[in-house]
Amino acid sequence: MRKSSKLYLVLLILAVLSLAVVDYVTLPAWNFQSFGFWFLLALYVALFAFLLGNLLGLRRAGLLGAGAAILLVLVALGASATSWLVWPGNAARYYAQLAVTEEEGQAFSKDFPDGLSSAARAESIILPRTDKQLSIATAQGKVGTYGARFHLDSDIFTSIAIRRDGETKLVRVSPLEYSGFLVALTGGSKGTAGYIEVDQIGEQGRLVPVEGGMVYTPGAVFSHKLDRLLRFRYRSYLFGAKSFEIDDSGKPWWVVPVLRNSVGLFGGPTARGIVLVNPSSGHSEFYAPGAEPSWVDRVYPTEVVITQANNRLRLGNGWINATIGQKKDVFQLSDSYNYVVSEGKDGPHAWLVSGVTSPSESDQTLVGFMTINLKTGEARRYALSGITEMRAMEIAQNDERVRAQALQATWPILVDVDGEPAYYLFLKNSVQRQRFVYVDLSSGQKVAMGETIEAAKSDFARMQGSRTVAPEDQKTAAGTVLRVKDSPEDKSVLFILAGEPGFLYSASSELSNGIRFMAPGDKVRLSYRETTSMGGKRFVLSLENDTIGK
């Protein structure tokens, strides 16, 4: 054998070995729906064609390799055309990916009743008292003595609902990750200590040790690396962004979405199921949609459903209308979104919630709201109009009561307050939350604030009480004032009547002097309205103080 032939034979063997190394490091999916797989295939076909051609003594081995690679790339590019929006019928396919139920605005109150509703209601929204940024600050203080070896994986800090002690709890959970490569190398078989949990209602954080350690994590090395474990067990699967969840007993799991492209070869990704991985043992199992355990919150990845929702909102009249045409009935989701958890008869559900607006950046109004169930994929669009979430944040931040503090607003959550849609958010600095806020959706003119959700809700309900109320919704009462207390925060007076200790009356101090100077023992006659969300609290519409006059 000629010396040059021996060289090419050695290089061919090294190329085969390098293929195994590259596969081990880059972890490609062996799937023709992955463009990365086509690229790697073209690279190695070119390399092998070149080496084999030279080994066989072909004069133009280089051209052979380059031609083979170019041919594969051209095939991939040609196949990708079937995924393009301009391909005949693709606009309709993208549009149909997400089935959306069109709902009237009034249905929102029924589907997503407020989180402070009475216990008699079958469902309610669970509203967080903190956000991801503040939860991270809380969680970092709980790493404790593990700080030299592990750190909080703030990129994976999943908001989930769990059932604990017969109640639904809203928490954020994040796995501990290795502080560096050497720590992962030396401690790989033992794993990290556990995970951090932050209660989104009580705002307390705690480190939860995991028996057996969290061995399989994204930051682990070699066979303990989570991505490598998944890839070598599921060679052809296309994976979405993983999340970290715990079941109702507190046991941790990796929830990894499995995707497939449904429009052409590379377009229209949609969920085909999930893989659950036990981070301690490495045991994994695939579940089709609907077959997953009941505690799983997220089957449909956020980035996938947002893309599907935007396609649904844009492409109803075809791609020409959406891109270069008149753009009739072309809408999109707002610039961001939030998550809410609804507590229903069949347990909690996590929903992505975002406004629907026009593509024009100058447009500060909404034409609706969309909610998408991240477990079932169910999507609803509500015909609710009003100000955008961004506008609500600006209104809250620029309110004269807090303007000087330069506070930052969280992304709002749309809620129902006694039949009126309103944004719920809170204002914070870099350290802690400062005020809870409700802003009415329709105009942004009602801005209620309080140091607690209850105080903010009461302020908003008082503002609702100041509006014109139908006679059939008004009730009357008379009696002797037993106790009275000023509430400077919302410029109201709180009082109870003798013989009615279970009812608290709230009256705006601006209604009359009879309210401003009310004292125990005064005889009063009044009209009021009640709200379902503030059980036991009555909002005064008019009052006559017979002791001192109106």
Image (cartoon, rainbow, N blue to C red):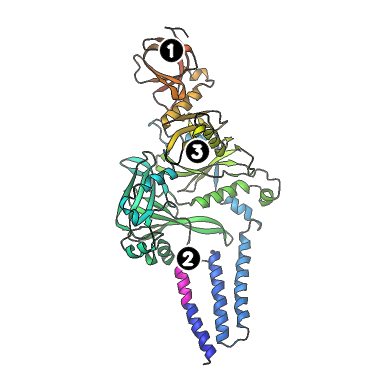
Residue drawn at x 41%, y 23% as measured from the top left: 537
Please say if 83 is above or below 110: below
Where is residue 460 drawn, in percent x and y? Answer: 48, 27
Residue reaching furthest to the right: 325
The residue stretch that appears in magenta: 17-28
Q: Between label 2 and label 3, give the one nearer the viewer.
A: 3
The answer, for residue 507, to whether it is visible in the render is yes
What secondary structure is marked by label 3? Answer: strand
Disc 3 target residue: 409
Marks 2/3 in contact by CB < 8 Å: the verdict is no
The answer, for residue 160, to whether it is visible in the render is no
Disc 2 target residue: 236
Q: Please name the amino acid that badge 1 sits on.
A: Phe
Residue drawn at x 68%, y 48% as measured from the top left: 321
Which of marks 1 and 2 precedes in the sequence?
Answer: 2
Where is residue 249 drawn, in percent x and y? Answer: 31, 48
For mark 1, does the 10 Å Cα neighbourhood hold few (<14), some (14 to 19), or many (20 or more) residues? few
Please say if 319 is above or below 55: above
Q: Please name the amino acid that badge 2 sits on.
A: Ser
Disc 1 target residue: 517
Q: Between label 2 and label 1, give the one nearer the viewer.
A: 1
Asked if residue 37 lies in the magenta stretch, the reply is no
For mark 3, does the 10 Å Cα neighbourhood hold few (<14), some (14 to 19), or many (20 or more) residues? many
Looking at the image, residue 172 sits to the left or right of residue 39; the answer is left
Q: In the picture, residue 52 is in which quadrant?
A: bottom right
Q: CA distance from mark 2 to mark 1?
A: 76 Å
Where is residue 453 drawn, in percent x and y? Answer: 42, 32
Looking at the image, residue 174 sits to the left or right of residue 260; the answer is left
Asked if residue 21 lies in the magenta stretch, the reply is yes
Where is residue 405 drawn, in percent x and y? Answer: 49, 34
What secondary structure is marked by label 1? Answer: loop
Q: Please name the amino acid that badge 3 sits on.
A: Ala
